[in-house]
Amino acid sequence: MDMTEEAALQERIAPCGLDCGRCLDNPDSPIGRLSRELARELGGFGQRAAFFARLDPVFDAYAAFEGVLERLGKGGCSGCRTGNCLLGDCRVKDCTRERGVGYCFQCPDFAGCDPGLPPGLAERWRDNNRRMAEMGLAAYAAWQAGRPRY
C-alpha cells in the first residue's frame, strides 16, 4: 500500500476503528449521497403527502421523514480526524494524537485503556482495534466495507 492509499484509509477509518467514510453524519458517505439522490427523486412530494396519507396513513409522517432525509444529506462531519464527530465528547482521536499513534491498538497502554465510551461502543472499539492489529489496515478497511455500518 502506497502513502496516498494509506493516508486515504487513515482519513476514512477512525482511531477507534469505525468507518467514518460510511457514517450517517459524513456528507460524502453513501448515506449522505443516497439521501440527496432520494430527496431529488422525491422532488415536491411533500406537497402531495396529504393526498397520499388518505391512501396510506404512513404518509402523515412525511414532513418528519423529509427533515431526517435533509439532515442525512447535509451531514456534519467528514471524519473524526478532520471534522466534528457526531460523538462530540469522544476523546479517542485526541488521545491517539497526543500519544503519536494512528490507532489505539498501536498504543502501549491499549490493553488496559478505558476510552470513556458508552459500554456497547467501548466493546466495539476494543474489538475493532484488535481486529486492525491482526489484519492490518487495508484488510480491515475491506472487511469493514463488506459489513453493515450500524
Image (cartoon, rainbow, N blue to C red):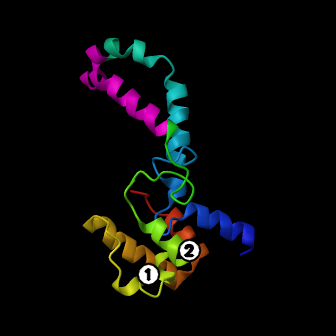
Q: Which residues are magenta?
A: 53-73
- Please say whether residue 17 is visible from this viewpoint: no
Q: Is residue 85 left or right of residue 40?
A: left
Residue drawn where x is 27% and y is 26% of the image:
58
Image quadrant for the C terminus? bottom left
The residue that mark 1 highlights is 130
- Please say whether residue 121 is visible from this viewpoint: yes
74 to 101, vertically: above or below: above
The residue that mark 2 highlights is 102
Crowd class of label 1 (few under 14; some 14 to 19; many from 20; radius 10 Å): some
Residue drawn where x is 36% and y is 30% of the image:
65
Q: Does the magenta-highlighted stretch encompass residue 58? A: yes
Q: Is residue 94 left or right of residue 57?
A: right
Q: Which numbered circle lies on residue 120?
A: none
Residue drawn where x is 27% and y is 21% of the image:
60
Q: Does the magenta-highlighted stretch encompass residue 105? A: no
Q: Quadrant of residue 124?
A: bottom left
Q: Nearer the viewer, residue 74 or 65?
A: 74
SS for tag 2?
loop
Q: Is residue 54 left or right of residue 136?
A: left
Q: Amino acid at mark 1?
A: Arg
- Residue 74 rendering spot, x and y as whole percentages: 51, 37
- Residue 77 rendering spot, x and y as whole percentages: 51, 48
- Residue 63 rendering spot, x and y as whole percentages: 35, 23
5 to 100, vertically: above or below: above
SS for tag 1?
helix
Q: Nearer the viewer, residue 110 or 124?
A: 110
Identify the residue at the far front of this view: 98
